[in-house]
Amino acid sequence: MPVARPDPRGRLPLPAGSKESSLTLERGLALLQAVADAESEAPSISELASAIGASRAAVYRLLVPLQSRGLVRREGSKVRLGLGVLRLAANVLPQLRLAAQPALRTLAEQVGATAHLTVADGAEAQAVAVVEPSWTAYHVAYRVGSRHPVHRGAAGKAIGLSPEGRPWVHSTGELQPGAFGVAAPVRGVPGLRASVGVVALEKLDGDVVGPQVVRAAQEVSEALR
């Protein structure tokens, strides 16, 4: 049975072996990341060992639990991502929607326009969460799952905004004739390229709506961290 030992910094006692377990977890995650970062050809055991700074024997040991969960698969000395990663990825979008809902609801009601969270997927931008205002006579119907080129429309263009540049962007009629959009990037969430925006059938005052959209994007970022 592990024996608790005092923490030298005066914190609660830590179970023996906790540092070792933490190191093993960190190396396992680094190994999974190294496999994922391989663009085309599957990396070899030797290449993975070099990538994470471990021995080949350590890589073999770390692969065992990852293989058992279907996160990686072995092809001789080569390692590829497994289908278990797809199962994890399938749970990402619902969690994104849930985290973004409060900020999008507030934004939609404030502006009186349809609010959305859009995520980059390669060269396309996909709407993953949409909230329509409750009090307007009419508004844009924007379907979850809608896709468009990432370089078009406020939602797509906002994703590529430089941190040193303008905090929000607007567009007119680029995705739908007569529609106006304002969007801002979601920053500070590693691995996520996304934007929060609104779309309306009448012209939006960017000086007013822009800061509201930026604030909503910041709230979504905080909810995801």
Image (cartoon, helix red, strand yellow):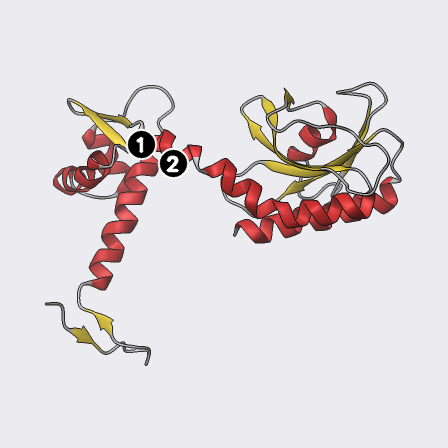
Occupied quadrant, residue 113: top right
Which numbered dot is residue 73? none
Side (left or right) of 193 relative to 199: left
Three-letter code for the amino acid on which mark 2 is drawn = Leu
- At label 1, which amino acid type do we have? Gly
Pick the front one: 39 or 28: 28
Checking the image for residue 84, the label placed there is 1
The residue that appears at 85% across and 40% down in the rendered structure is 206
Residue 1 x, y percent position in the rendering: 10, 67
What mark, if any, has residue 88 been given in the picture?
Answer: 2
> Label 2 neighbourhood size at 10 Å, few (<14), some (14-19), many (20+)?
few
At mark 2, the secondary structure is helix
Cβ atoms under marks 2 and 1 closer than 8 Å: yes
Left or right, 120 with respect to 109, comes to left
Q: Please state if 181 lies on the left or on the right of 29 as rendered.
A: right
Q: CA distance from mark 2 to mark 1?
A: 6 Å
At horizontal 87% and vertical 36% (from top left) the residue drawn is 204
